Image: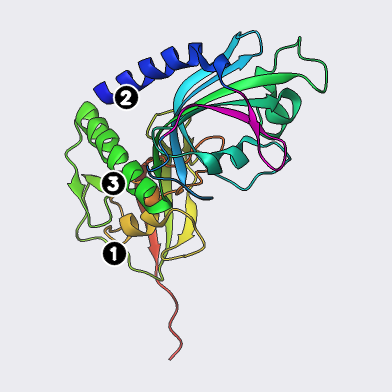
Amino acid sequence: MRNIILFLVALNLLSACSGKKEYHKTASGLSYRFITENPVAKAGKVGDFYFVNLTLTTLENEKLMQDITYFERHEPVYPGDVHEGLSLLHVGDSVEFLLNADSFFRNHGLMHLKPKALTNPDDKIKLYIGVLNILNPYEHFVVKCEEEVKIMEEFVKRKDWKTTLDSTGIMYEFVQLNPSGVEVITGDSVEISYIYYPINENGVTRTKPGETWKYLVGDDKFRVSGLNRLLEMMHADEKIRAVIPFSEAFGEEGFEPMIPPYTALIMELEVKKVIKPVSFK
């Protein structure tokens, strides 16, 4: 963290003198000028994730956005797209891009940030990017998993749940046991009541009082594979609650707007009925 702070301080100091450097242009006409360059450091490619310090301003240096964030690099979608400029960058580089305001805000879903004063189609904005790290998809996945484990552990500690950890990373706790009940196995149909919500607890989905949901255990078309894992631990008339990692829930894409990408899922289940498949012998 200390190194990141020092990097940001240096970036801000260098930004003040960046006017001394001339802009260059890429083949598509994207204007850029380096503030710092580290050409021997790690570079990235399309599909990699860039962890950056980002500042967006008008030409008059009115700040529109500032954040330390990450995003996935894509193929450019329009001439002068900043994603083309990412091909020039290495870890430790900082650069200022001169962008067409309308194209940037429109193509990146940021129209809500566009100042009303920028009405001319040729209006420009400045985007400062300082590259803190570049991760390939696997490295990024590992980082997100490590971050998620901490969030999950903090959640169960705050709720005082006494969970068990299974081999897929699911943290679960039985709140009602019935070991003499009918065991649930793959291929059974079950009638269940459920509650689920993202680990940030924003929004709850549940079965209506007195109603159940019928589900075929092991159905590989259902995105939340953690549901099958939980049901296969259960018997009729048992209740369980669990924290399901994103890899066993809605994955890297999430299920917007309720479940963001890379988000663990809280699920509470009760098996009301187990229906065994009919055997024709």
Label 1 amino acid?
A: Val
The answer to which of marks 2 and 1 sits earlier in the sequence is 2
Measuring from the top left, give residue 92's x and y in whole percent.
39, 33
**Element type at marker 3?**
strand
> Could you tell me how far apart the alpha carbons at marks 2 and 1 are, in whole angstroms?
56 Å
Q: In what quadrant of the picture does the N terminus appear? A: top left
Contact? badges 2 and 3 (CB < 8 Å): no
**Element type at marker 2?**
helix
Quadrant of the image occupied by residue 226: bottom left
Q: Which residue lies furthest to the bottom in this view?
A: 281
Q: Which residue lies furthest to the right in this view?
A: 120
- State the extent of the magenta-drawn residues as a range: 22-37
Q: Can residue 240 be seen in this view?
A: yes
Residue at the (54%, 44%) spot, across then down = 87
Mark 2 or mark 1: which is in front?
A: 2
Residue at the (25%, 46%) spot, across then down = 172
Which residue has dot 3 on it? Answer: 240
Label 3 amino acid?
A: Ile
Which residue has dot 2 on it? Answer: 4
Q: In this view, does 84 lie to the left or right of 95?
A: right
The answer to which of marks 1 and 3 sits earlier in the sequence is 1
- Above or below, 228 relative to 38: below
* Nearest the eye: 159 or 85: 85
Which residue has dot 1 on it? Answer: 182
